[in-house]
Image: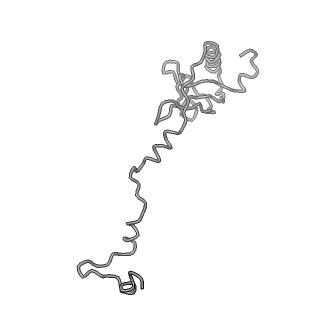
Amino acid sequence: MSRYDDIINLDRPVSAKHPPMARIDRAAQFAPFQALSGFGATIIEEARLTDERPELDENEKERLDMRLAMLTETSSDPEVTLSVFVQDPKKSGGQIVPKTVRIKKIDETERVIIARDGTRISLDDVMGIDSEFFDHLAGI
């Protein structure tokens, strides 16, 4: 004879004061508990890599200035691909992103490139300029 033979076949007790709990509510008691909500997202964000803003040397700055001057002097609206440093909104650093634009105007006063579609790109964020416009010019 085992220790529980006298109670093994009895019905479970039912409270006279409290109504039975719904099955979904009973299941919620055993749901996983996340004590640090949002911690996983924080870990993922912290692991995301960004690059520091590159510093152009004097030769690169001179080459960039020459290309900007040529683009300013042209009467057409050349299409160029700019290498633009985009600051990360959530952490220090950012990344260099290629942006292909048709240049409407280069505003030296505000130090921005204004594209035909209205996009404004700071000259300080431009790291390089590629264009078929420059291919025919030797040494530039």
Relative to 81, 40 lies left or right: left
Viewer-side residue, 47 vs 119: 47
Left or right: 82 in relation to 13? right
Is residue 52 positioned above or below 31 on the image? Answer: above
Q: Where in the figure is residue 71, as x and y percent of width and height?
A: 63, 21
Q: Which quadrant of the rendered structure holds the N terminus?
A: bottom left
The residue under the point 65% across, 22% down is: 75
Q: Residue furthest front?
A: 1
Percent from the top left, x then y, of residue 76?
66, 25
Residue at 48% across, 30% down = 92
Q: Quadrant of residue 131?
A: top right
Given residues 14 and 127, the one toward you in this image is 14
Give the image's coloring scheme: one colour
**Relative to 6, residue 33 above or below:** above
Residue, x 76% and y 21% (percent of image)?
A: 136
Q: Does residue 56 lie above or below 77 as drawn?
A: above
Which residue is painted at 74% across and 18% down in the image?
A: 137
Query: For the C terminus, which image quadrant?
Result: top right
Q: Pinpoint residue 62: horizontal percent, then vertical percent.
A: 62, 13
How many numbered marks, from 0 up? 0
Quick check: 53 above or below 47?
above
- Residue 94 rendering spot, x and y as whole percentages: 53, 31
Name which quarter of the figure residue 72 lies in.
Answer: top right
Q: Residue furthest left?
A: 17
Depth check: 90 or 113 in front? Answer: 90
